[in-house]
Image: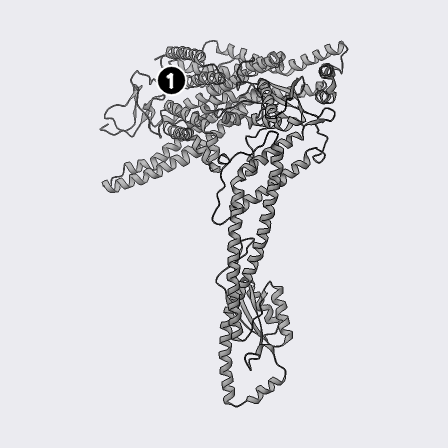
Amino acid sequence: MSFFHIVVVAAVVAAIGAIAWFVMPKGKNQTLLRTAALLTLTCCYLMWAITYLAQLHPLIKPRRSDLRAEY
Amino acid sequence: MSSNYPSLFRSEEMSLVQLYIPSEVAHDTISELAEMGNFQFKDLNPSLTSFQRPFTPRLRRLAEMARRLRLFRSQITGLSPTLGIPPLAAVPPFTTVGPRAQNAYDELEEKLKEHERRLTDMNKSWEELGRRKSELEEKRWVLRETAGFFNEAEHRHTEIRTSFDESDNAPLLEHAAEYGNLPGETGLSGFDLEFVSGTIERSRMPTFERILWRVLRGNLYMNYSEIEEPFVDPTSGKETHKDVFIIFAHGEELLAKIRKVAESMGGTLYNIDSSQDKRADALREVSARLEDVDTVLYNMGQTRRVELSKVAEQLEAWTDAVRREEEIFKTLNLLSYDQGRKTLVAEGWCPSRDITAIQLGLRRAMDTAGTSVPAILSELRTHQTPPTFHRTNKFTEGFQTLIDSYGIATYQEVNPGLYAVITFPFLFAVMFGDIGHGILMFLTAAAMIFWEKQIAKGGVNENLETFFFGRYLIVLMGAFSIYTGFMYNDIFSKSLHIFNSAWEWPHNATGLVEAIPTGHRYAIGMDPGWHGADNALIFNNSYKMKLSIILGVIHMTFAICLQVPNHLHFKKYLNIYAEFIPQMLFFHSIFGYLVICIVYKWSIDWSQASSAPPGLLNMLIYMFLSPGTIEPGTQLFAGQAFIQVVLLLIALVCVPWMLALKPYMLWKEHNRIKAQGYHGLTGQENGGGERHSTEHLDEEEEEVGMAVTESSDDEHPFDMGDIIVHQVIHTIEFCLGCISNTASYLRLWALSLAHAQLSEVLWSMTLDLALEYEGGVIGGGVFVFFMFAVWFAGTIAILCVMEGLSAFLHALRLHWVEANGKHYMAGGYPFTPLTFANLGAEEEQ
């Protein structure tokens, strides 16, 4: 639950990316597959990291007024 | 970087190639090349009009054949019990290549001519008979209808006569007879009115009546009746309704007038006799003749059908063969002809890596033609810009089309289509994030991919064709939407609770309550604790706004970086330090700094800090308005004022750097060349050298070689003014663009927010109402069922299709303007090889 997580996951994603780079079969689609794999990893990581970071140290707390007593 | 495999990163390396084709293999060589579809022919006789070209007469004959085939097709499809045309795959192929092909085409031409002659003959007599038949039918109607009038009239007449007889006024009648015998009264003594009868179109009837009334001043007795059955025109198939009329009038003059009026209004007159016996005879005769005509027509219809079915059997093969032949001769017209050696010279572009394949193809063509002299291929060196050719497959085709519709890449430029494969669906999904909608979209496209062969074979409806074409794009858009939906924790406006939430609601609390932190952090995605909270929107706005800024800055940085491979590839190293580096510095000293501040602010635990969290927007504004001073209480980190001043100075320095360095360096370079005495020759110097070498290479083919090199000498002269103006525009565009483009990425926030809100509104207005309804099991069930239908229709129509289209357009704009604008020159022209693959595609449209 800290900035540390972001870095660890980044390292994991980078490792997966590196594996994906070398695993991709040779052939006419190699460039496409490599690019697609790296971009997908980057995009998904960014999305997760931003969402996680935004909630890491929340400045406001959720508030609601429609709770029922039995809940 | 020349790899062994073609990739989308750069367009294919192209070669300008010359082919020497002996005239006896020319036809088959072109056919083989079109079959392979990787050779783009250049027009070697641009000065000739199409009439002067050698194969134009041949093409005209082919066009005539194509016209005949179209005629047959329309006649076949027009037959009333429909006659099927067997598809191309089911008919024996027509010999389009080889030594016998020419004869085959000539025979085909004769055959088509013969068929056409027979068909026109048949159609002519068919028409003739059809006309005859409708005339006879009309006459029969006239006879039948007028019989009624006559009966009526006769009846009335007898009545009158009897009344006359009673009053014994016979001398009057005798007296009348003395005036001369009238033809109309031969059969009926005393029935002394003459008449005109015929048919006329129903719509003209009122006018006809009125005109007659005026012309004859009311001196007529007119009777008419409608023919129920419509008359069908044998050629056009148009239906007309007609009326039978009979007009009684007195006097030759009046009758002539009536005839004239009737004929001028398109009526047809039929002579009938007033005597009942003769009319009955006429009716019998007409009926008999009608029967004859019908049998003849039926027989003729049968022969025509047989004839057409004979044509239909081969129609597809013939059409295909003629289309191929047309393509081949159109191409042959582009070649130049060497009279002396009876060879044709072709020139054109082909991908360099396909040259071997083309050479094999040339040998194959020689074998089919049955000669021993193959066409000879030689590569030319040239200064012309080759066409841009990206080898796409069914997966990448859709993505490349998105980029190509912005502009065709410059030859060998970095192709953004490669990256759009992922970035496009991702940016789309940021706006469309919802697990439910993502799944719907993914499944739809996946189904299209799963049954793509069947769908492609069956042909698609025009509106759905676009979606079918983009099926791989849509499937990725759906997949990414599921992921972003998971991040937004949004499934049909509901939320998932999978991990430990950071928030807990107090038990048994009512009224306004605040959640209690649990100490956890929701591991993946948005915390469900925010779902339904009163202040969820405030939190989401802040999150999504920052998300879009960060993604935007990263996307644009990536786009700027794509300049580098271009500059390296085109050996324009000046552009790297005169454009790329200052652009990166300028952009990141403002927006890169903003992104770092956002991340920094998120990673600080402000509840433990000494100061309140500062607003980042104000920070950025005051960085420009009052550099060097930070208002107390709004400091983000120590030394902030100093760093901001430094960044501002860097950004300021970058502007003149971008503005002045490149023109200055170019000017210096130009002066250096001028000092060496090459002024005004820079362009010709290169081109001239090239020309010499080509001339040495193929000394005898100078006319062709000249044509290539001469047109390549169009290098622009050095113009300082142009360069400066261009650079000023470029710099201003970039600096202003940085700000407006970053703001433009805020559409990611706006659209994703709109999508989430809309989906929530739809839920609360339909299913929410139904689920809270308390009206018994049956009533409630029906209500839920009905509301579910409304909700699902709304989800598909509004949220998936409409919102999807809008998110698609915004993602497209972000790629075209914000990203492509940073690096994509798009100054190329597409490679359009000769191919048989889409024969007849333009005819169908």
Q: How many marks?
A: 1
Identified at 53% across, 67% down, the residue is: B285
Q: Quadrant of residue B566?
A: top right
On screen, B177 above or below B508? below
- For disc 1, the chain is A
| Relative to B158, B336 lies left or right | right
Q: Position of residue B340 (x, y in %)?
A: 74, 25
Q: Please give the residue where the numbered disc 1 appears in the rendered image.
A: A52
The answer to whether residue B113 of the structure is visible from this angle is yes
Q: Position of residue B107 (x, y in %)?
A: 61, 38
Residue toward you, B241 or B749: B241
Q: Position of residue B215 (x, y in %)?
A: 62, 71
On screen, B276 above or below B787? below
**Residue placed furthest toward the right:** B677
On-image quarter of the N terminus of chain B:
top right
Residue toward you, B67 or B399: B67
The answer to whether residue B410 of the structure is visible from this angle is no
The amino acid pointed to by label 1 is: Tyr
Identified at 50% across, 55% down, the residue is: B298
Identified at 50% across, 86% down, the residue is: B163
Q: Position of residue B545 (x, y in %)?
A: 44, 23
On-image quarter of the C terminus of chain B:
top right
Residue toward you, B425 or B620: B425
Q: For mark 1, does the 10 Å Cα neighbourhood hold few (<14), some (14 to 19), or many (20 or more) residues?
A: many
**Residue placed furthest toward the bottom:** B168
Q: Quadrant of residue B523?
A: top left
Q: How is the image coloured?
A: one colour
On screen, B247 above or below A47? below
Instruction: Label 1, secondary structure: give it.
Output: helix
